[in-house]
Amino acid sequence: MDNKCFIAGLPNAGKTTFLAALMNLISADNYDSKLKLHRIENVQYLANLSEKWVNMEPLERTFQTNEHKDITINLELPNKETVDLYLPDLSGETFQKIYAVHEIPEELANYIIEADTFLFFVNVKNVKELGLISEHFRDQNNEESINTKPLTRDPKEHDPLQIQIIQLLRIFLHLRKNKKIKIGFMFSAWDLMKSNCSEMKPEQFLNERMNMLSQYCNSNPQYIEYYTWGISAQGGELEQKDSLLDKEYPYQRILVESNDDYIGNDLTLPLYLLIGD
Ligand SMILES: Nc1nc2c(ncn2[C@@H]2O[C@H](COP(=O)(O)OP(=O)(O)OP(=O)(O)O)[C@@H](O)[C@H]2O)c(=O)[nH]1
Ligand SMILES: [Mg+2]
């Protein structure tokens, strides 16, 4: 069995950190994750990431020149069957380019067409609190010098995150001739929600903080089957390194929260539920 899982997300969404933590978890002998490493080729890239992740060293940004498209991990399922999982580590700029200039390399388009499942990463840090339009204008009027220069719109910079994500999903569907997308929204840096004492569940985060995306997904059930997860692959901010390195095992830093009762370390759970037995 094989599964092509397409990892998507704009810059700084948490894609590479997820892969680094995943590599550590599936290889850990003392943790019983749903998916375990069975075999891997081209291990070097993930092994390097995982080593940095263990030591809480900052991971490099993925630029278009150092994308890794050829990651395949052979994983063992709980029923002992194995699955070849394709997980490319692409640069957020690649997705910005698809959005802003509608430019997509043929290889990538084929990947999107053939993908069985999608993980879409959104860093909760990049999701702005919603405000009232009246508040927006009040704040603008309070600014001492109002900038009267016309704004040059840079779609990547200025367009709201939700608009960019919805447009990307529409492009994915267009390429797939509307073949259904099975997608897990991975709200990364979920530790920040917890440190703000938020009781919010991932689904509620989507509904309340990204309500346009939520409406888009919920009004298109024939094209989009979606799930939501809160994940912290890093465990906290890099500045909290000292306390995070104190844990007995690195995987104990990971936090995964579902919409039902699951709160734990198993970063493979969203993947396992998405790809199915
Ligand atoms: N607090 C916190 N920060 C995180 C977590 N995961 C990632 N980050 C931070 O989010 C930023 C982006 O993480 P990356 O994994 O590099 O994001 P990416 O999606 O690969 O980004 P590009 O390579 O630019 O496309 C980094 O500064 C990380 O330190 C997390 O679980 N918690
Ligand atoms: Mg990256």
Image: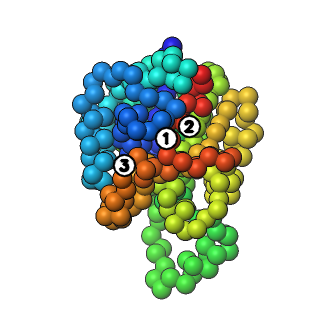
Which three-letter amino acid code belongs to the residue tagged 2? Pro
Query: In this picture, is 115 found above or below 200?
Result: above
Residue matched to label 1: 267
Which three-letter amino acid code belongs to the residue tagged 3? Tyr
Of 131 and 233, which appears nearest the observer?
A: 233
Tell me how many marks there are. 3
Asked if residue 70 lies left or right of residue 10, the reply is left
Residue 44, percent from left and from top:
24, 31
- Please give the label number shown on residue 270: 2
Query: In this picture, is 136 found above or below 76?
Result: below
Q: Residue at x 67, y 32 (%)?
A: 224
**Crowding near pointer 1: few (<14 within 10 Å), some, many (20+)?**
many
Mark 2 or mark 3, earlier in chain:
3
**Crowding near pointer 2: few (<14 within 10 Å), some, many (20+)?**
many
Distance (Cα) linking label 2 and label 1: 7 Å
Mark 3 or mark 1, earlier in chain:
3
Query: In this picture, is 232 found above or below 119?
Result: below
- Please give the label number shown on residue 249: 3
Distance (Cα) linking label 3 and label 1: 15 Å
